Amino acid sequence: FRFYKGTSLYAQFVLLYSILCNACSSFRDHNVFVCIFIGKYEAQITPGVWQAAKFFGFMYLHPSGRDEDHIHPEQRQCHITPMISKSVSDIECPSVVFAYLPNDDASTYHILKMVSKFDCGVQSQCVVATTFAKQRNPDQYCSNIALKLNTKLFSICKRSRAWNTAFDSKNGIPWVAETPTLVIGIHLSHGLGTDTTTCVAATGCLDDGCMQMAQELKVQPKSDIVGSLLMQEITKSLCHQFRLHNGNRMPERVLVYREGVADNNFGPIVDTEIRAIRQGLFDVVSSRVDDFECPNQSLCQKKGCVFCTPTITFVVCQSNNVPRVVPSERPTTKSKNVPSGTCVDKLIMPFQNGMQLSTSEGKISREKPEGTNMQLFELSDGGFDFLLVAHGGLKGTSKPIFYRTILNENFVWRKNEDSTPLTKEMLQQCTYCMAFQYGTASKAIRHVPVLEYSKRLSNMAMGYVGYLLGRKGTSNSYIGLAEREPDDNNGEHEAPETGPDHYINSDMKGRRIESGLKTILLPAFAPYSMSASGKVVYRPPFRPHLSA
């Protein structure tokens, strides 16, 4: 990256693109600033006409200032004198790119997000002219944009947050702040009609206040269950993000919120997703210790268990439910809704709630093996399901979220002396406090923020996945369905079914690397970097938050 004498600020960012005109072999130079859109290998010269493009090199404006007098470094070396020379590490990538859109056209928005995240790896913020013009109070619109930017500009250098959190004179979210705890939210967005793709988005909290987030995005064929390999990679990626953010300290407990699961899918969730989360945690823990052995090795069999991995609590969040919560007495508020934080955990709960399904001995062993410091909590399980209205409804009847706990190891086993059991009351308090931690809103929201961020990311990706698959725009595809191949695990554990049940980055095809690493669609936001030899190096992404 260099500046040259005799070049204007305008000329420093002019790129020379060689445009292939249909089947013609001739090239035509084009100015980047008059393009409506320039993607990875395509450009739109005139509205509605897409042509293949290839980056050829940089152009520099002649000191005369005339646009037609461009100098290419390879053509006129005598006119080029390096003025400032900087290495790549000395130059910070753009913090954010602002896009001023004339209207709220969805296709333009999706293309812009695809270019900023998939192609360029930079944060972007859209400002819509028609939306701004409709505002009665323009300052409120600007304030909302500022809240979004404050969340998006969180980085490894400036660990900013919208606000601090304290409960009962202690900093952080209740229960989460006691000991290193990773909170994960997972959301799936499905294609409509004959579209056969599903975007899987996951968000992980990096701090005890649940304000600093890292996110992960995967694509799979349409399914309500996340594939085993994808779930393992999501777990490993968010664990590494947490470790790199917290001084190389691993999480000791994991709390997972999963949205969009019907009652008849609880069995597949336990058999596939929770087992894959356990395997991902085991892979991360075992990779950090030479000759790692589980205290419960006879039953663990290198697949992970409660004694060698962080304890897991898995909560299903059902937003489409029948019950409604209304005040028993005449409300005094204008909205006539129950206040924020109303919780119902008795009377109307289904009978399964009292059957101790999430802490049964068939799921969680009570036998303590030798060599572990974990202790049992001596508590009785009365069920963990509850309805929560976290938001304060302004119009209509507030619709609660139904939280169904299908696994709760944190109620049974104590990881260390600072840990307390995750009882139903503590889970309710923890969930409600997290509802205030959404960086784009100054009030409590309906979902927990980890789910809301994941929902935004998966819906955003669903808008441009058609371009990545080559179904829209040009026929160039940047992701493709993986072929069946064995997982590189050196025989340490059974290889999961790896194909064809997920999509991989086309740039990774044919490379001799682990199957899971090929599923990374947004490398600029992943906690990995890869050398030319294929060696994986862990490093925190500069800005890990993708949606706000």
Image (tube, rainbow, N blue to C red):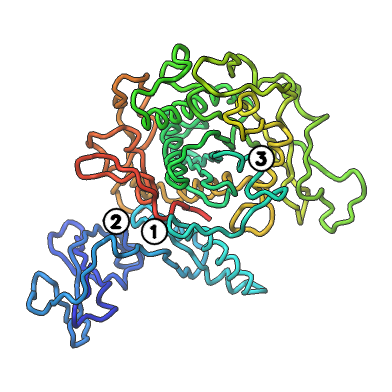
Residue placed most toward the observer, 215 or 84 = 84
Type of amino acid under label 1 = Val
Labelled pair 1, 3 in contact (Cβ < 8 Å): no
Which residue shows up at 18% across the image and 63% down it?
56
The residue that mark 2 highlights is 40
Q: Left or right of 322: which side holds 472?
A: left
Determine which residue is flagged by label 3: 319
The residue that appears at 38% across and 45% down in the rendered structure is 527
Percent across and percent down for residue 200 are 47, 40
Which mark sits nearer the N-terminus, 2 or 3? 2
Disc 3 element: loop
Frontmost residue, 238 versus 375: 375
Whole-percent x, y for residue 162 in the image: 58, 60
Amino acid type indicated by mark 2: Lys
Name the spot of residue 149 as percent of width and height, x first. Answer: 51, 63
Q: Which of label 2 and label 1 is nearer to you?
A: 1
In this figure, what is the number of numbered marks? Answer: 3
**How far separated are the C-alphas under marks 1 and 3?**
32 Å
Residue count near mark 3 (Cα–Cα under 10 Å), binned few <14, some 14–19, many ≥20: some
Residue at the spot x=41%, y=64% of the render? 95
Q: Are marks 2 and 1 in contact (CB under 8 Å)?
A: no
Q: Which three-letter amino acid code belongs to the residue tagged 3?
A: Ser
- Between residue 225 and residue 384, name the one nearer to us: 384
Q: CA distance from mark 2 to mark 1?
A: 14 Å
Q: Position of residue 459 (x, y in %)?
A: 51, 48
Any mark on residue 205, and which?
A: none
Residue at x 59%, y 74% (from the top left corner)? 133
The answer to whether the residues at label 2 and label 3 have Cβ atoms under 8 Å apart is no
* Residue wearing tag 1: 122
